[in-house]
Amino acid sequence: MGQTERIPEIEYRLLQALAKSRGDLEVEDLAARLETDQAQIAAAAVLLERRGWVEIRVDESREWILTPLGKEAVDEGWPERRIITAMDESGGSLSIQEISSKTGIDPKVVGGALRFLREREWVQQEGPVLNLTSAGAEALGKETDEEVFLSWLSGRDQERVHETDLTDAPVPLADAAINDLARKRKFLDAKTRARRFPSLSDEGRRALETVQPQMEVSQLTPEILAAGTWREARLKAYDVGLDVEPVVAGKIHPLQRVIQETRKAFLQMGFTEIASPFVESSFWDFDALFQPQDHPAREMQDTFYLEKPGRVELPRDSATVERVRAAHEDGGETGSRGWEIPWDPELARGAVLRTHTTAATARAVAKNPEGPRRVFCVGQVFRREAITFKHLPVFIQVDGIIIDEKGTFANLLGTLGQFYTSMGFPHYEFRPAFFPYTEPSVEVFIYYEPKKTWVEMGGAGVFRPEVTRPLGCEVPVLAWGLGLERLAMLRYQVLHMRDLYLADVQWLKDAPACPS
Amino acid sequence: MPVVGIPIELLQEVVGRSLDAQELQKTLSRMGCDLEGLQVVRRVLCRRCSFISELGAQEEIPPDCSECGAELRDEGATEELPDLEVLRMELLAVRPDLFDPGGLGRALRGYLGLETGLPKATVEEPAFDLHVDDMVTKPTSLRPYIVAAVLEPVRLDGERIKVLMKLQENLHWALGRDRRQASIGVYDLDTVEPPITYTAEDPQAFSFRPLGTTEADGWPLARILEEHPKGRGYSHLLQSFTHYPILADAQGQVLSMPPIINSEETRVTGDSKRLFVDVTGMNPRAISSALAIFVTSLQMLMPEMRIRAVTVRREGSEPMPTPDLSAASHTVRVSEARRILGLPLERAQTVELLERMRHGVLKGNGDEIQVQTPSYRNDIMHEVDLIEDIAIAYGYDRVPQVLLPTTTLARERPVELLSQRAREVLAGLGLVEVVSLVLTNPEVNDTSLGRAPSENAVIVANPISRDQSQLRTQLIPGLLQILSQNRHRPLPQSLFEIGDVTFLDAKSETGAREERHLALAIVHPKAGFAEVKAAAEAIAREFECTLSLEPYDEPPFLPGRGARALCRECGPGGAETMVFGEVHPEVLEKLGISNPVVVLEGVLMALAGKDPLDQDEWRRDRSS
């Protein structure tokens, strides 16, 4: 044959160990001898048995193990011994009632102990009183065989003894007595155990003369690779199902992902991205949008006004300011009758945290009133709301406008529909709504299948002439302002808006980057 | 927004036919009403004042009556009325004519095509005069405007009196701006002897018995303001005056002290047969609209009821009969409706749509339609408002959704593009992104880090909570807060954030400006300077930024373990691009963090070799 067969190193070493033994070593002993774990030896033995090189004798036998109750009996003394000792100390008799208090034995087990006392004839009962018998007096100074046996067992490794090793006990105890210790006293537990004794077959003995151990490699190293020894080595197969230390992918926040998708959707439709400051004048946030100066939304209770900076300059272009004033007071040249209340420039100078990104689009109309032009703005907006499950004082909005001579309400609905379709929500609906700065106005709802409900997403409309004309714009302006948190909440199954911000790191680690 | 419950039975009576729940919900939603759903309401009548409390199915009877204060849980104090099925609707501030079953039913009749065009609105000959004393136009007792009407006969059985009171309350909210601009008073006319005088009286010397009192004597006006529940609630509207507005009759019997409370003697009950109604206020348009809506809605509920004028007389002015229920004239161009809506509208169809919204149309032809809008529609300011009505009548669900054919070019903000790149880099370093609120407070932003509150922070004048009283000036504090909140979660935790911080800036148009920052924070038992320096170098490498480091001992860093990175290429003398280092144990202790933490914060534009002042286009455009 020429070539030497190589077998796994562990199998080779097992064969060697068996060659030196007489078949009286069980797997446990072999593992200790070869300084490896039992599972590996057991597996190797089974593989060698299949080749006919090893025979395995299975020895099923019982093993006795000390229970916690037995351990207590050894440490504290057996209940019946504690009782006769206490009787002896009280002059040879004791009332049944006193037993528990004199001995400290749990009242629940006193009854059991009495039974054993009577069985051993150590006591005699007279009414409620127990008297020590002569056998009892004799027992005072002498441990029973059972007591000796239990003490011996408690001194053994793992407090256990195999039934074949019972002969090692200092006192011979009949099987019946041991069974009683287990069943009646619950001092012992019996366990059936299969012991496996591998031994070398004749074939195995012959094989050992020809086979060689195979080097086995788990971790590949630069040395092994450089020397090429991996060619001879056996590359150990791993259990691919084993647990490993978890690692978390670095990733982008779910809300941020929705923001980026939103930006992408509008960029794809030819929109230019713009920004406006968080700190905004009431002029751009309200007045330019034809929000009357006594509108509830402008009150201190709904809007954050600022202490620093408290006031903001009005636009330098005083003609624009003048046209806005006129639109409010009597409509000016917009064809409207206006709000018919005096317009106060001081109120327009009040600094606020912008309540909507529509402030950005209003600025965009003023800056470049001639179409065609499409712009959008994504950013934080502020409302004076306490932090609750549903509300936050800051949230993200996307505002967009289309300035286009040919722009119509139908185009507005078309654009919004396109947006929600690209965001993955093709089931949407438009309902009439009312905003001070758009006419017609519309609210967008999307259908949320898991809850079978319509969820409001935001408002839109065609800017009123009272908004556009004072800003120098004569063509239709289609406009919208939509919330993004709700989209993120629907997409990532987040129940409460505040959970998006008050971050639970574990949730962020767990939130999938590519949810199905 | 307040929510109103519309009794369905009453609504069907006004509409003139039964409406199944589904049809009703669908129609109202197409009309733009914000429906919350249907509800069964339990009703309990207070035997003392006849006020009806409405309760949810599970709700207990309140301890006392909200109107007269009677103890409702006493034996025999209340009477259970039959349950009521109501439609719960959010009030639309701009459409106060839809707040009650009368007005809503009127609109539904039109929308469903049962009765279209302008509703009849007849005001009969004046019943009597109302004299306005000069006192109410003086700055010391200013509430100059009043309109009034007489309604007879009325039938305030069952739900109607409740509907009347609710409508009054809701109009106070929507048109009255919580009674300042307009407030409505309603009285049993049979307890009043005309003519009526509207004047102002001395708060100490003048007295009357306010609604709900059980005392036989009158209360001085000042006491009403101090002690009566309604007086306390609205005292801010009168407090600064030397004299308070009073309506009184020919016998000197007080009707009310607008806008606070009526007198007990003129109380409206379920048995009242004739009503006197007034609206006072600061805004003539608001009071006229409020009265028009109030009387026309009630007429829908009580078709036999007639509206009679009251003549308001004022020294030096022409006598003015009120209410004015005449329609307003507007012009709508069919071509303009087509242009704005993008619908293929023709004149005949447009007229029909307008009429379904209860507008009247004068005979004519051509492009221009002469429209008569009802007096209760105070929201019609412009042709576009009527064009919206046309769209609503047409049905938003039938409007075709069409994309504009115009081509425009997309352009994204440079700072957003940079932010996206930075996100890739930071996530690539194994960090998980967080998003925190830009609103913060001096404790979190500064003092918890061991430094004085920032002087360049934007400060809120009316914070809703001390926790959100300013805008953040740095990202690190927010990240440390998140680590603190997550201190019981497994380590390591490696986080980053990219977002705007805000500084006061006198050179900026609005006095402040944003700056886009990036920041990271890492916590684990072996977190140390070397780790964060390696991250800083990785970031600098990706932005092609050469770092020159100098020690930086400012909070929150541990002195000797903080660094400031300057980039020579990024600005003359070196622009500050990043600070990073180990967080001081004192800071960690305060935050309850028991593992070392390293943090880094950088200025995105500076890292990219740009001036941070160039971040916002709107600033740059202004300076150019």
Image (spheres, coloured by chain):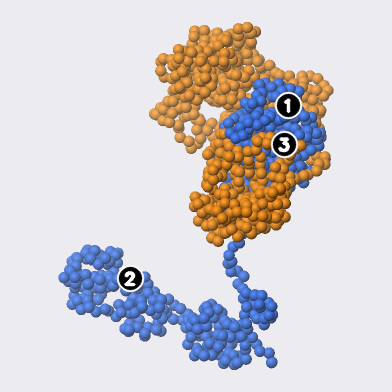
Chain colours: A blue, B orange
Discs 2 and 3 share one subunit: yes
The residue that disc 3 covers is A361
B520 versus B351 height, above or below: below
Q: Secondary structure at mark 3?
A: helix
Mark 3 falls within which chain? A
Tag of residue A72:
2
Pick the front one: A511 or B393: A511
Mark 1, mark 3: which one is toward the viewer? Answer: 1
Residue at 75% across, 45% down? B412
The quadrant where residue A308 appears: top right
**Label 3 sits on what residue type?**
Thr
Residue that mark 1 sits on: A318
Residue B355 visible from this viewpoint: no
**Where B320 falls versus A512 (above or below)?**
above
Identified by mark 2, the residue type is Glu
Q: Residue at x 57, y 32 (%)?
A: A301
Image quarter in which the C terminus of chain B is found: top right
Q: Position of residue B355 (x, y in %)?
A: 73, 25
Mark before the other along the chain sequence, 1 or 2: 2
The residue at the far left in this view is A91
The image quadrant where one finds the N terminus of chain B is top right
